[in-house]
Image: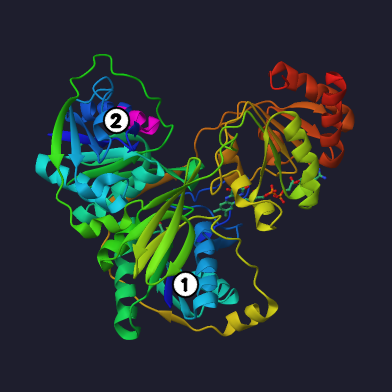
Amino acid sequence: MRILVCVKRVPAPGSRINITSDGQAVDAAHLGFTTSPHEECAVEEAVRIVEEHGGEVTVLTLGPAAAEEQLRYAASVGAHHFVLIPITDVDWDPQRTAAALGSAIAGLEATDGPFDLILFGNESADSGGFQVGVRVAHALGRPIVNGIKGIDLADGTASARREIDGGFEVYEVPMPAVLGVKEGINLPRYPTMKGRLASKKAEVATVTSDAPAGGQARVRLHRPVEQVSETVILGTGPEAASAVVDLLEELGVLS
Amino acid sequence: MSLLVLCEHDRGVLAGASLEALTFGRDLAAAAGLACEAVVIGEGAETAAADLGAYGAATVHVASHAVLRDFGPLAWGETLAQIIRSTGAEAALACGTDRGNEVLAHVAALLDEPFVANCRQITPGGTWSMTRMQWGGSLLEDATLEAGIRLVTVAHHAVEATPADTPDAGTLVPFAADLADSAACTVVADRVVLTQGITLATSPVVVGGGRGVGSAEKFAALEELAAELGGVVGCSRAVTNNGWRPHSDQVGQTGTRIAPQIYIASGISGAIQHWVGAMASKNILAINTDSEANMVTKAGYAVIADLHEVIPAITEEIRRRRG
Ligand SMILES: Cc1cc2nc3c(=O)[nH]c(=O)nc-3n(C[C@H](O)[C@H](O)[C@H](O)COP(=O)(O)OP(=O)(O)OC[C@H]3O[C@@H](n4cnc5c(N)ncnc54)[C@H](O)[C@@H]3O)c2cc1C
Ligand SMILES: Nc1ncnc2c1ncn2[C@@H]1O[C@H](COP(=O)(O)O)[C@@H](O)[C@H]1O
């Protein structure tokens, strides 16, 4: 089983997202970075699948040179091969990103054979374009379903579950296939000490892209207007319970 | 020239989100000098189309094909792309739901056009300008769109669905889609129905716990309080990452968006990705030892204390009053 996962490096802001003075990016000067959550689960899912069925996991990212950190993290939790498409701009638009990822994947497949399964996140945590996986699937001529929270593979078919109100929809997709997964599909493991050490030695291949810009262009980022509310402090210890229950009664949730 | 609004339905039941899309779409169409037309796809589409005229659709394209027996992202996308081509539509819009975003992404890939997801506001013109959501709505992006055919979704809940001042005809026009059998490979094959009760998304009371709770076992006190209030327990991502609660309990950007009468958020710092899932709550009571925590400063009410003392005391007080 050959599986490829596309992951994006994103900043990890805390209580507030600050923006650079040119309005083009999240100000990450004091922030750590992480793998976009849906994709962290996609890597875990890929590693579990090859643990069960055999095979290898390749992880691909388009981002700044520092995105190597997210590839090494994937190595520390069990992925095997790593490819970076380096960019120097802050973020590429979705069409351009998809074109670059699509041709990089086609290149990898031309040398090493097709991937049975390609996993994306449902949407990237930062820009959230909801489309890169779909575009890549079309470019490769493969079926794709998004929003996946469960995958079973048998006899060349990926049985994929998608959450809906009150249950799941099931899709039976012939492989090779592409799936967009959501956080909650699994609980990603933490890297072991051995995994961390191995990740330092992982080799990261580089593929360049000259994909042209698409039709969506960023003007600037800004924060939504927040309603500021005065906080009413009901107490500083268990004796606050009485004031809390008064409030619950007032709101009519005690009936 | 027209703007097509994709109206989602589930086996004939129109999604409320579709009426939001139509409300937004008819205003956008008017501003852009386009006719507003709706599209409904597949089995049950005619039933779903009944009210669309009242929300401003002059024409409703009703697409059918054997493959369209149920929802399928590729089959729906292919169908909408065909209607765009055959009507010469200038633009297509859907609501930014899972299905809406997914179908429009397929249309964009098929037509090789850009697609802008989750817009809150759009100004048409030679180049369209829009404000769209990033980070699940914690951040906004002003963007421009240059395209042959404009493909956009409107963020869910960005507008309230309201009928048009003057209802339009909503004339049904059948459309025979031309789909290959292979388009069926991503049509829903089966459904698993889980037992339904109050869910996190719909519960009137949510008792939330974060890292401050300390362990899976210590959620028992939150369960007790939630049960007393006829509510459910929610949690932060720190909790799910620790394996203390299932992901289905997670509130936030990559979890569930809640809108209870009251959200009791205990031991939760209120990171922006958690807040975005909690901010639609009518009232928030933060319980935290740190008076500077974001959850505390943003909440309407707070108790600055150890949750392990406060939560059982609240449960006890409720029981005492009930006698
Ligand atoms: C892309 C992305 C998406 C994310 N999506 C989500 C999401 O969907 N949902 C989500 O929740 N997070 C999400 N996160 C994670 C988020 O950034 C925070 O890391 C997380 O919400 C922190 O959880 P917490 O508040 O429980 O923990 P902490 O931030 O560690 O806060 C613990 C709080 O408990 C208080 N406390 C400690 N002990 C006690 C006590 N005894 N009594 C009372 N108070 C106490 C502390 O003062 C503190 O305020 C996401 C992050 C990223 C990068
Ligand atoms: N820069 C990137 N590098 C690698 N994968 C990406 C990148 N951007 C997006 N993706 C993948 O495409 C999915 C959808 O992204 P988006 O269309 O931006 O919401 C993400 O969840 C990732 O799996």
| Start-end of magenta stretch | B14-22
Of badges 2 and 1, the one in the foreground is: 2
Task: Give me the residue at 34% from left, 60% from top.
Answer: A144
- Residue closest to the eye, A203 or B317: B317
- Mark sitting on residue B40: none
Q: Mark 1 vs ligand 2: CB under 8 Å?
A: no
Query: Residue B64 lies in magenta, yes or no?
Result: no
Q: Is residue A126 visible to the viewer in this orientation of the structure? A: yes
Query: Residue B17 lies in magenta, yes or no?
Result: yes
Q: The numbered mark 1 sits on a residue in which chain?
A: A
Residue wearing tag 1: A65
Looking at the picture, which amino acid does disc 2 mark?
Answer: Ala
Residue A235 pos. (x, y %)? 84, 28
Q: Secondary structure at mark 1?
A: helix
Looking at the picture, which amino acid does disc 1 mark?
Answer: Ala
- Residue closest to the eye, B136 or B85: B85
Residue A188 pos. (x, y %)? 60, 64
Q: Main secondary structure of the magenta part?
A: helix
Q: Is residue B115 above or below residue B21?
A: below
Q: Secondary structure at mark 2?
A: helix
Q: Is residue B144 above or below residue A123?
A: above
Residue B94 pos. (x, y %)? 31, 38
Quarter of the image where the N terminus of chain B is located? top left
- Mark sitting on residue B48: 2
- Residue closest to the eye, A19 or A230: A230
Q: Is residue A123 visible to the viewer in this orientation of the structure? A: no
Residue B189 pos. (x, y %)? 36, 53
